[in-house]
């Protein structure tokens, strides 16, 4: 059950990255919430989940940087795809 909930969160994070790639205006607090939750999910790397947790950590850093500097659009598309695929595999 918790894996599917985290998968839904990954898919929503992928949608957030897609909206940022399309230059949509996202409220500041939504970016902060997703950044903090992705960072918390990325800390699963400490429990031995080494394969996919670094993606969450890097995604949270990208979200943090997107608040202050301009991030290349290709990077947003890349993380959008990665997060949606990662979330989709949670349902298998």
Image (cartoon, rainbow, N blue to C red):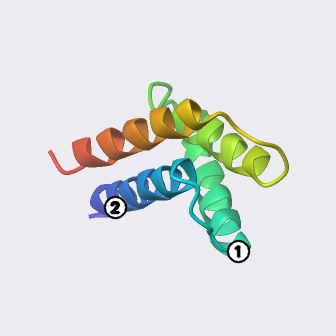
Cα–Cα gap, marks 2 and 1: 19 Å
Which one is nearer the viewer's eye here, 80 or 59? 80
Check the picture and name the quadrant holding the N terminus.
Answer: bottom left
Nearest-to-viewer mark from 2 and 1: 1
Residue 74 screen position, x and y as percent: 54, 31
Q: Residue at x 57, y 54 (%)?
A: 20
Q: Secondary structure at mark 1?
A: helix
Residue highlighted by disc 1: 29
Residue 14 screen position, x and y as percent: 43, 51
The residue sitting at the left extreme is 92
Residue 74 higher or lower than 29, as above or below: above
Residue 79 screen position, x and y as percent: 49, 37
Residue 53 in view here: no
Locate residue 42 relative to residue 19 in the image: left or right: right
The residue sitting at the top extreme is 51
Residue 51 in view here: yes
Which one is nearer the viewer's eye here, 5 or 67? 67
Residue highlighted by disc 2: 8
Q: Residue at x 50, y 57 (%)?
A: 19
Locate residue 7 relative to residue 91 in the image: left or right: right
Task: For label 2, count other residues whose C-alpha is less than 10 Å away and answer few (under 14), some (14-19) or many (20+).
Answer: some
Q: Residue at x 38, y 38 (%)?
A: 81
Residue 20 higher or lower than 55, as above or below: below
């Amino acid at each position: 059950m918790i894996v599917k909930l985290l998968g839904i969160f990954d898919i929503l994070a992928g949608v957030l990255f897609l909206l940022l790639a399309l230059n949509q205006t996202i409220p500041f607090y939504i970016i902060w919430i997703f950044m903090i939750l992705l960072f918390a999910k990325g800390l699963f790397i400490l429990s031995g989940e080494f394969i996919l947790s670094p993606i969450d950590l890097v995604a949270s850093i990208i979200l943090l940087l997107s608040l202050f500097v301009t991030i290349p659009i290709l990077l947003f598309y890349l993380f959008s795809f990665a997060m949606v695929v990662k979330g989709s595999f949670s349902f298998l």
